[in-house]
Amino acid sequence: MNIQEYISKLMNNPSFMDNVTSWQVLPAREAKYGRFPEELDGRIVETLHKRGIDRPYIHQSQAIAAALSGRDFVVVTPTASGKTMCYNIPVLQSILKDEASRALYLFPTKALSSDQVAELYGMIQDMGAEIKAYTYDGDTPASARSAIRQAGHVVVTNPDMLHQGILPHHTKWVKLFENLKYVVIDEIHAYRGVFGSNLANVIRRLKRICEFYGAHPTFICCSATIKNPKELAETMTGRSMLLIDENGAPAGERHVVFYNPPVVNQQLGIRAGSIPETRKIAASLLRAGVQHIVFARSRLTVEVLTRYLKDMVRDPLGNAGRVRGYRGGYLPTQRREIERELRAGRITSVVSTNALELGIDIGQLDACVLCGYPGTIASTWQQAGRAGRRGSVSLLIVVASSSPLDQYIIQHPEYFFKQSPEQALINPNNLYILLNHLKCASYELPFEMGETFEGVEDTAELLEYLKDENILRQVSGKYYWMAEEFPQAGINLRSASDQNFLIVDITDPKKHRVIGEMDRFTVPMLLHQYAIYMHEGTQYQVEELEDVGYYTDADLTTSLKVLDEFDREDEGAIARARGEVLTSSIVTVFKKIAFDTHENLGWGPVTLPELEMQTTATWWMLPESLEEKYEKEPLKNALVGLSHLLRHIAPMYLMCAPQDISVVYHVKDTFTGRPTIYLYDSVPGGIGLSDRVYEMQRELFSHARELLTACPCKDGCPSCVGASAGPGAKGTLISILNELLKE
């Protein structure tokens, strides 16, 4: 069945259409063209002609002209709009013109690096030019590394390798740094939060080394649609950026369907789960033979859905290769194999986290199903772009979960279609992150007295601190590295934790094999003793293999205390403050959850040490009069509901993942002495998310009231006040919010 027939079938299916809150058809878009610059080398033009490209899209034309004139720019267009040409053509032109010219490509993932270098290499082969483009990452053989350092015209890598494998050894890369003409940073919207803040500091170090060797490269940035691409690119690179955002690429017709699972308990307002509903939709696509991708928001959901769908298509020998899972934690060789199988059309259904959201070429998919709203408009469009990549008709189905944000989006489609995408936030001057990179920069090149680390006013103070800690030594007006350890090794760019754990399959006592990896903060939740770890739909019990009919989830308990208060605002009904806090988290119990029915089969204790973290927070102090007006239990239920709402609303404004922030409530807080709600960054040192929240208090509380009053339930349900709030929470919370917002 082709995609057009499948769409018609859905439209005529009453049981499906009864749950559709919005079905928008976005019309096909015509291409808008520009011209190639006259000075472009004839070999490039001829190669493009052979590939059926006679003229560039308007954004490609503008980008190539800007790059050739040495202008730093950021190009912002949707998925599959040909952004690769925006940097490949000027880079190839500069190397054809001057054989010594070099370029450095940065991609957020190794998968994207290998994917893009294959395309670039194809162009070079078609031209018959002596241009050498190589991928330099952890998978590059040691025998090839020396040749790449000496002869690589285009070095394609990722931020992690630049940070650990290139910058600290810049003396081996003299040819690259002396002749560096272009630095390309692709998919910059992926660099937000901790990862983006780290990369901005890696770029500071890169520019410092380039300056040492006398090079001043042009920066080319590419992004999917976000609200502040220019601001993000400028913060990332420390350069003034030209914004190119007029998309000239054509697009096929796209059907965008918002699906809200049916209500199964009218009194409590409980809806059918998003996982079973997504499973039904994916199963119908699988039966129809429509190649599709399912995006889920967690590793666990990916594995549960993969298991369900694999069970549908197993052959007599138990093989189910038409369905594959894809997520972080799989080994690179396994991920490359899945990408190849997708391109070849041998996989009908792939279930992925946002690991496949970026522009890896996975061939032509016809449909995309989202199990839960991804959290941002930008991510939704990015994931939707994985279907219909060749200009064909495509289908996007967003299946809402019962979270307040999902329910708001699904019931207010106009917000999604009319609102501009969200901002991406980074904080390069976060002290925890900055100090780490200052150590790395000192190791790479000694700091001179009076030198600043690109705009960091406190550089001298920080260098003195490192000197006092016996990490740096001051001699003849310079600060030299004197510690024994290699500073880059202890810094993980993608999280604040520098530890990861390997997952080893010990089923065969003669042959243990590594099947995946996980970071330190996720391990207590998913790899505690007796946990069921799922990998490509197969269940492993930690310490021994068992085929059981359930999977596990864990409960996390968090306590919080204030260390320092930076700002305070007491005006109005809601006093607020921001400052530094210490959180302590411990996993106490795990639950066993049945497949199919999702019922709770029991629980078990977890004995693991506490994890402590210092971070930044904003907290709201509610009036003491609430304690007199409401009894303790109703007030507690209302605070549970308000915490639940804020946890889901804030990411919509901050363009962060829900797990990037945490919210806790205290009915009688020991620090403030009043009912208090804390929202903190789930990252050591904080990355500025709670600081932004401090500025937008009334917005969040007004939005919370709007969601509460719009929810059709009577007394509160998982969609508005959450599953943990007790009876009457909704009415009490509406009453409290009306009182707080009456000014």
Image (cartoon, helix red, strand yellow):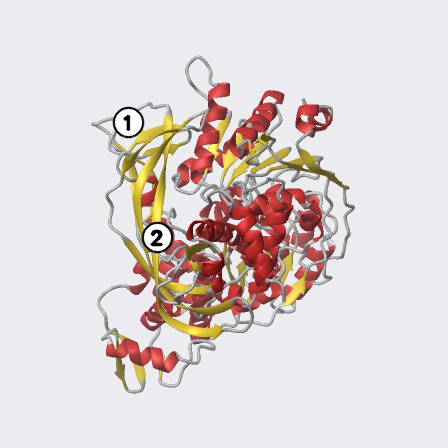
Residue type, mark 2 in image: Thr
Disc 2 target residue = 558
Residue 704 position by quadrant = bottom right
The percent position of residue 619, horizontal first and vertical second, equals 45, 64
Q: Residues within 10 Å of mark 1 (few under 14, many from 20)?
A: some
The one nearer the camera, 314 or 321, is 314
How far apart are labels 1 and 2 at the CA level? Answer: 31 Å
Residue type, mark 1 in image: Leu
Kindly state the secondary structure of the residue where label 2 is placed: strand
Residue visible at 46% across and 43% down in the picture: 726
User: Up-down: is 658 above or below 397?
Assistant: below
The percent position of residue 417, horizontal first and vertical second, equals 70, 48
Tell me which label, 1 or 2, sits earlier in the chain.
1
Disc 1 target residue = 545
The percent position of residue 463, horizontal first and vertical second, equals 33, 78
Q: Quadrant of the N terminus?
A: top right
Residue 554 visible somewhere in the drawing: yes
Label 1 vs label 2, nearer the camera = 2
User: Up-down: is 117 above or below 10?
Assistant: below
Residue 321 visible somewhere in the drawing: no
Kindly state the secondary structure of the residue where label 1 is placed: loop
